[in-house]
Image: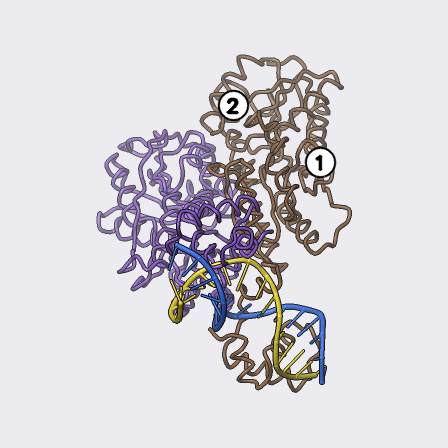
Chain colours: A purple, B brown, C yellow, D blue
Amino acid sequence: MATMQDVANLANVSLATVSFTINDSKPVSPKTRAKVEAAMKDLGYRRNAVGSALARGRTHVLALLYPALQHRFSPTSVRFFTSAADQARLRGYNLVLWPMSNDAEAVTELTSSGLVDGVVLMEVQLDDPRVSELSGSAVPFALIGRTRDTTGIPFVDVDFESAVENAIDRLVELGHTDLVLIDGGVGNQLLGGYGPVARTRKAFGEVTAQRGLSGAIMSGVHSSAGGRELAKEFAAKHPETTGVLMMNEHAGPGFVAGLQQAGYRLPQDISVLALASSLDTASMSEPEMAVLISPADELGRLGVDVLIDQIDKKNNPLPQLLIECSYSPGATMGPALKHGR
Amino acid sequence: MATMQDVANLANVSLATVSFTINDSKPVSPKTRAKVEAAMKDLGYRRNAVGSALARGRTHVLALLYPALQHRFSPTSVRFFTSAADQARLRGYNLVLWPMSNDAEAVTELTSSGLVDGVVLMEVQLDDPRVSELSGSAVPFALIGRTRDTTGIPFVDVDFESAVENAIDRLVELGHTDLVLIDGGVGNQLLGGYGPVARTRKAFGEVTAQRGLSGAIMSGVHSSAGGRELAKEFAAKHPETTGVLMMNEHAGPGFVAGLQQAGYRLPQDISVLALASSLDTASMSEPEMAVLISPADELGRLGVDVLIDQIDKKNNPLPQLLIECSYSPGATMGPALKHGR
DNA sequence: CTGAAAGCGCTTACAG
DNA sequence: CTGAAAGCGCTTACAG
């Protein structure tokens, strides 16, 4: 690989001048610029990223942190990976994947390595130890998700509270008053629980109470087979229920299948609305589910934007963005029957 | 952040000695080592990755290349991201995501940036221009997948040929002689087509011909809704077919649902076997599909292993690994009826 | 076993 | 507008 010095030699200018023309960091005469550019082309020169990073104190590398050993992301979470990587590239950064167990020690290792200019956090818990660790470091960060206390913490997240209200509104409008929320579980209680589930449960409890609806929660399955089993249990435990909020992408299709095996007709006997999911996943079930679509791509993109703006000292105060889900109809939504089944 | 010089000052030794003790690159007396380690602990010192990379000529960063704008990976492809990242971390490397359009220019930009020690390629086409470009560069690489001509090219891939034979064997054993393969399309024909699909089609054609079976191919849908539509078309075009190889994770559940809407009973009227998919995806359909499970996690891991061994000059000749799919039964497999429907 | 010094490939005050 | 030189944080021959 040719170095900047090689270019300088060939163009008969100084190392500094080559740097100036490459970075447009100082005025360079057209003549000199031409010489330098010709030399670069001749040598196929590309600026070495490591040398540059050391001199600038900027690596242009961002880390995407997510819990290690968690290989079963929801299809929706997975989109953060690609949309964040795209946006990073677009803005001249690179995104490195940083799987780590949920301990603070590994965060320190990352932030003090000097490898990354900033950190994006995924799969945030309400009391996430990684966040306090990052707050204490000098490295800028942004969350996709949010902690319980978000004071001074830049984040982008789904507006779960509003999504729950939206979902319940739609069901109530169709006459449903007995509802069940199905989710994937809050996970580690020590960390306050997985944000999306914890917030959704809270909102679900509040909104159903406030409107005098019956609202129960079911959880604990993580596969389509589990969803089938859960449907049996649901039929036994909640015979009066006519409306289901499904916030479990792995179990959704199995649950819908299980309902039908248990004798329910959709949507005559029961309505199901997928929450914070994707069209893709919602259409995996038979019939296709109605769904409040999670703005996953947008979140990945915005998470990176918020982070880079912060690195460039462009945003003040720190942004906290809640993005709405959008509704897409499906064959699982219908009016409640007057007399149950 | 404390630097190595800070540590040296505090420990009253030279910069070099600190380096020697950190890297175990030269003998250091126990006494000196203790002083240095105490100083490091006092200062909370961590070696700066950029300085180290520049001096060593090694960044310990690997790139994972995949086509940009391709946000609809199959659930199985997605696992490469996390399993590769895990293995990289385990071996002391970092994995950066590198979405790029399928052109050679961007590869050059990557390999000449000095940022990465090696490259893993995903979503390989039979005549992939990225591969020829990488072959011409000095940067080590490994494919997850393989090109048409694999001479001298290190790769790990699913053994699609053997999987197809395995699948057909199982169907033939149950009496099926009229088969259809459903896939997601070969994609860009200019690049020879997407490896898994192209190889599977070829093997399917060969094996069916060789055994005197009827074999047709259907394609062109990329969603569960598309799968439903395709089932109608299938019923019309292939009324004699009793065995389906499903290599399309997006369309699979919809196709199975569509079959039943078209009046098929599974598995009495027709058998469906998912190919190179996952248990998760196969269980999304109702009933759950039998499946030849793709060794996705293993491939991500091995791809990184092959690459790092090569960087460490550990492997010679370059490995070319084909990994088998493993069978998992499901309710969609049954004996062929004597007289069709 | 330890240290002084050169060097990795850049950027950027500083001087002209 | 251009250049000589210091410096970013390390590693590693070389000398002792």
Which class describes the residues within 10 Å of circle 2: few (<14), some (14-19), or many (20+)?
some
Depth check: give the residue in front, B126 or B132: B132
Question: Which chain is disc 2 placed on?
Answer: B
Label 1 and label 2: CA atoms lie apart by 28 Å
Q: Position of residue B213 (x, y in %)?
A: 71, 17
Name the residue carrying label 1.
Answer: B150
Q: In this view, does A335 lie above or below A11?
A: above
Q: Residue B316 carries which label?
A: none
* Image: A149 above or below B291: below
Please report, as a chain letter, where disc 1 is located: B
Q: For the residues carrying marks 1 and 2, which lies nearer the camera in this image?
A: 1
- Left or right: B8 in relation to B71: right
Q: Which mark is residue B220?
A: 2
Report if the CB atoms under discs 1 and 2 are less than 8 Å apart: no
- Residue A121 appears in the rendering: no
Q: Residue at x 28, y 42 (%)?
A: A168
Q: Nearer the viewer, residue D2 or A238?
A: D2
Q: Where is residue B269 in the image (x, y as percent from the top left)?
A: 59, 20
